[in-house]
Amino acid sequence: MNIENELKYVINELPCNLNEPYQIIQYYFDPRNLENDLMNIFKINDLSTITTFRLRLVEHLSIKHNYLTLKSKGLLSRKEYEVEIDDKMKNKILKQPIISTIVKNRYIIKYDEYNFEFDEYLNLGYNLFTVEIEFKSDMENNKRTIEMILDKYFKLKYKDVTFDPSYKNSNLLNRKMKG
């Protein structure tokens, strides 16, 4: 388990000169459907604080990975449990009712001490580009630095949506307002 501290911005476009994307499909499920399996996999006794149960399939440069993730409630900061799983477990999970699916390309650019994760959403019915940046602590100083990098280095227009739950990946298909 780790604590995820993350800022999220909607951006008007993707930066230029991006590398090959990570192709990602994210499936969201109700954690109660596999409660015993999840508690065994993650070595936790209680799922009552878990609000997000996700299976992420990632392909990059023809290499495939499957990640199982649990996240607690929160917007800026929350608990995150993540493990890589095999195809057998992936197939078992995919037999469960799917709440939501997100398909996206992710481009990762390292700048200074940050990894800027630029996402291009492919199945929403409208164009959406975001960037997520994790940081260790001291949100205000990190926020100023990150926004300066978005302005000066990437030259992007952006809107901070960190505290808007409708921009969580698990909620994007339900967004009423486009973009």
Image: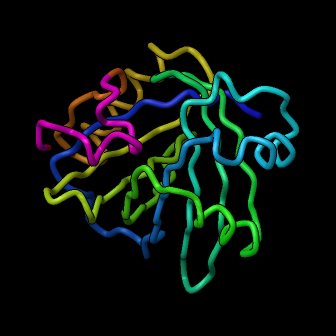
Q: Quadrant of the N terminus?
A: top right
Looking at the picture, tell me which residue is in the foreground, 99 or 26. 99
- In the image, 41 versus 160, the foreground residue is 41
Q: Which residues are magenta?
A: 164-178
Residue 57 relative to residue 79: left or right: left
Asked if the magenta segment contains residue 28, the reply would be no
- The C terminus, quarter of image: top left
Where is residue 108 shown, x and y percent of the image? 47, 58
Where is residue 87, by image quadrant? Answer: bottom right
> Percent x, y for residue 63?
62, 81
Q: Is residue 161 above or below residue 58?
A: above
Q: For the stretch drawn in magenta, what is the main secondary structure? A: helix
User: 49 above or below 20?
Assistant: above
Instruction: Identify which residue, 139 or 169, lies in the foreground.
Output: 169
Task: State the residue at coordinates (42%, 62%).
Answer: 107
Residue at 51% x, 21% y: name it.
Answer: 74
On screen, residue 132 versus residue 128, left or right, reads: right
Front position in the image: 152 or 16: 16
Q: Is residue 15 left or right of residue 64?
A: left
- 50 shown above or below 155: above
Q: Quadrant of residue 48?
A: top right
Q: Is residue 52 left or right of residue 153?
A: right
Q: Position of residue 70 (x, y in %)?
A: 64, 40
Q: Residue at x 76, y 45 (%)?
A: 38
Q: Position of residue 121 (x, y in %)?
A: 29, 59
Residue with the most extreme bottom position? 62
Give the color scheme: rainbow, by chain, secondary structure or one colour.
Answer: rainbow
Residue drawn at x 88%, y 38% as measured from the top left:
43
